[in-house]
Image (cartoon, helix red, strand yellow):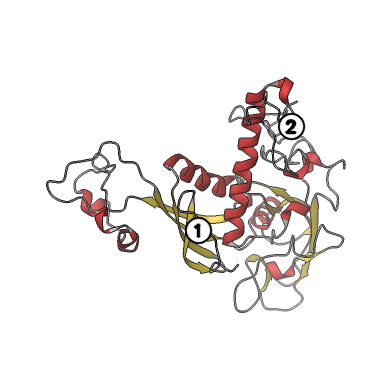
Amino acid sequence: MDYGAMDVDEVGPRVVIRESFPDRADFVLENVDLAFANSLRRTMLAEVPTMAIDLVEVDENTSVLADEFIAHRLGLIPLNSKQIEDVLYTRDCDCDQYCENCSVTLTMHAKCTGDEIMRVYARDLVVAEPRPNEWVGNPVITDEAGLGAVICKLRKGQQVRMKCIAKKGIAKEHAKWAPTSAIGFEYDPNNKLRHLDYWYEINPIAEWPVDEKNASWESEGGIQQNGEPFDYNAVPSRFFFDLESIGNLEPDAVVQQGIKVMQQKLAAVLQELAGDENRNGDAGGDGFGGQEPDGMQGGEYGVDQGYTTPYVNPGATSQWGGGATPYGATPYGQSGWNQ
């Protein structure tokens, strides 16, 4: 993405890209409040959809590792999630369990015939056609040798033959769908707002070291001067993000998807506030109706309420049973918005 020609609006939110790499982005978000910035951080961590192996059919496994052990390792292998909008959630698909519209099939067959130990890598996962697009489901391989993560090891005569079904989901349901490994988040690096005064045990300077890079980014008046009166009405408006992707999505795509999910969730709130009589977005002409942007009504653009897994009840129900999780109100088993 070309960041050089971005429009800058001093009134609205402003984003400054400080560093950009294929798997990491360091940027500053300005002219927003703390609630918005933290909501974006939490959304990028837990609610951006990606692809991950969710169902493993074991045809043969004579290795020393149990079936469940290998299945768990397969689920943690990052899969390319570019243009994941082309993939349906299982709960939104008309199939019984999975199909080419809501999943990607990968096969793995390896057999050791020599005396040396054989390693099975992520590169040994073969993507089957058809699939929603040409990128989604490909194992993410970033090492110079082009091998990917080690799945298991085999001795002479041992073999594994498995069929893996990758599905679309979010990290709120399972960490294997996480698009990021970590997101650094900081504001007020010079502690001008004194938010850290009560958050230390012995020495606040030693326990909360100043990030010189972020501190130098603050304006010249960002450091509290001796004798300067404290502004009790001051609030943070500049936030420092350091986002590290695991490779399934580019960092800029993670941010864009995070904003998109937030828009969908806010559209759902507006729709509920408008009431049953104004489901189409007409809230009496006051401009605050719940009409969502084009393409966000239902389907794969519906409100992201989690993901449904096939461990207990295949297809459209959650592994926890019914339409709710043990966390409470999140209706993972439902489709789209409540009508």
Q: Position of residue 139 (x, y in %)?
A: 70, 65
Q: Position of residue 128 (x, y in %)?
A: 84, 63
Question: Looking at the picture, does residue 90 appear above or below residue 23?
Answer: above
- Residues tagged 1 and 2 counted as in contact (Cβ below 8 A): no
Which amino acid, mark 2?
A: Gln
Whole-number angstrom distance, CA of label 1 to CA of label 2: 40 Å
Residue 265 position by quadrant: top right
Circle 1 packing at 10 Å, graded few (<14), some (14-19), many (20+), is few
Which amino acid, mark 1?
A: Val
Question: Looking at the picture, does residue 46 appear above or below residue 133?
Answer: above
Secondary-structure class at tag 2: loop
Secondary-structure class at tag 1: loop
- The reply to whether residue 175 is visible in this rendering is no
Precedes in sequence: disc 1 or disc 2: 1
Judge by depth and name the residue closer to the eye, 63 or 2.
Answer: 2
Residue furthest toward the left?
Answer: 227
- The reply to whether residue 12 is visible in this rendering is yes
Residue 34 position by quadrant: top left
Q: Position of residue 267 (x, y in %)?
A: 64, 36
Judge by depth and name the residue closer to the eye, 231 or 123.
Answer: 231
Q: Which quarter of the rendered picture does the N terminus lie within?
A: bottom right
Q: Is residue 51 left or right of residue 34?
A: right
Q: Which quarter of the rendered picture does the C terminus lie within?
A: top right
Q: How many numbered circles does the render carry?
A: 2
Residue behind mark 2:
334
Residue behind mark 1:
8
